[in-house]
Amino acid sequence: MWYPEKTLLQLQRPKAPVSLAEAKLEQDRKDQELCEVVPTKVTLGHRLWLLQRLSSLLDDDFKKGNLTKLLHEWMRQLKEVELPNQERDSRQRQLEVEQLLRRSADPKALNRFGGTALISAAAEGLQEVVEALVKAGAQLEARNERGDTALILASNKGHLKVVEALVKAGAQLEARDERGNTALILASHNGHLKVVEALVKAGARLEACDEHGNTALVRASSDGHLKVVEALVKAGAQLDGRGSNALIRASVGGHLQVVEALVKAGAQLEARDGGGHTALVRALDFDHLQVVEVLVKAGARLEARDEKDPSLVRRLAWALKKAGARFKARRPW
């Protein structure tokens, strides 16, 4: 027999509470969806890093086979994340992120590659997404498996607006990756002038060194980034630090304009690298004749220890002759 009253009571009963397990699954789903709104790309350098980390497994055929399977599976998972994101623009990602955050997705959650949504968004230069995540409480100093923070990645890629947003939010300027690089060192290395200027203005340490003792000025000089070198010198970067030497590194690379700028700024011509070589000797080693000419004209000389190498003296004489024998009046050794 049908009882309308009972049916009405049944309809009015509250739904059974969701179990803790179900709630956790739903939260995990939202968290991963948030992480995957922004693309999670692996650069060539990242892949090389991964292969180096896994190289210890390559001591027998069995491990090689297992490693190959792992890499194929890893790349398959990567494509699952990348392909859907290729068709999303920055604004669409921002709206999706904001919607997920309103549904209580955790901005601190880790994706399957060990990073956060903020790290991925910063690496891709998605300013609006970064700002939404920061506002929701994303960890500014969270790191991926390589030790990169959001600020380090944004600086490395030259994403000025993202860098400015992260600095404004209080990101640590002196955080380092696993090779000792700071945001300023990486921005200088890659020639991102505007990012360098923003970081310097925010108070980034000019004399911070990477694991090899290279400062931002040394890295910029080594790679021939004249405008960055000039900006760092103007900001007060030391020309002759205890570690690597900017003038020597610029001379090795044959970066004539950088050498001229450093000489003009007062770099020590007789400073020596770890092998005891001056900028003049290193320029000769790499046959950078114009650099040799600039250094000699500025007053660089071969010292007694250098003169013991007859080939070095001959190369200098040849270089000066090729440059036009403009220094007959003064022997530089």
Image (tube, rainbow, N blue to C red):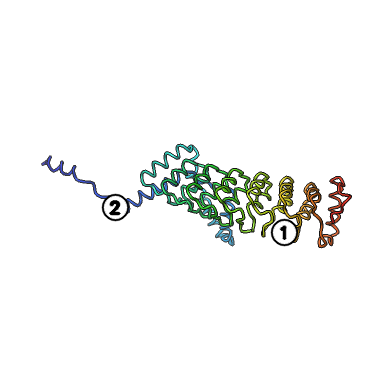
Instruction: Tell me the residue at 37%/43% (across/down).
Output: 102
Say which quadrant the N terminus sits in: top left
CA distance separating discs 1 and 2: 66 Å
For the residues bearing labels 1 and 2, Cβ distance under 8 angstroms: no
- First in sequence: mark 1 or mark 2? 2
On the rendered structure, is 10 left or right of 219?
left
Instruction: Tell me the residue at 12%/41% (across/down).
Output: 5
Amino acid under disc 1: Asp
Q: Which mark is residue 19?
A: 2
Q: Nearer the viewer, residue 34 or 169?
A: 169
Q: Which mark is residue 26?
A: none
Residue 185: percent from the left, percent from the top?
Answer: 60, 51
Q: Secondary structure at mark 1?
A: loop
Instruction: Tell me the residue at 44%/40% (across/down).
Output: 94
Q: How many marks?
A: 2
Q: Nearer the viewer, residue 156 or 68?
A: 156
Q: Nearer the viewer, residue 40 or 4?
A: 40
On the rendered structure, is 287 left or right of 83?
right
Residue 34: percent from the left, percent from the top?
Answer: 42, 45
Residue 187: percent from the left, percent from the top?
Answer: 60, 48
Judging by the rendered image, the residue that carries numbered circle 1 is 273
Q: Secondary structure at mark 2?
A: loop
Residue 306: percent from the left, percent from the top?
Answer: 81, 60
Q: Mark 2: few, some, or many residues within 10 Å (few <14, many ≥20)?
A: few
The quadrant where residue 285 appears: bottom right
Give the number of the mark in front: 1 or 2.
1
User: Is residue 95 positioned above or below 220 on the image?
Assistant: above
Q: Mark 1: few, some, or many residues within 10 Å (few <14, many ≥20)?
A: some
Amino acid under disc 2: Ser
Say which quadrant the C terminus sits in: bottom right
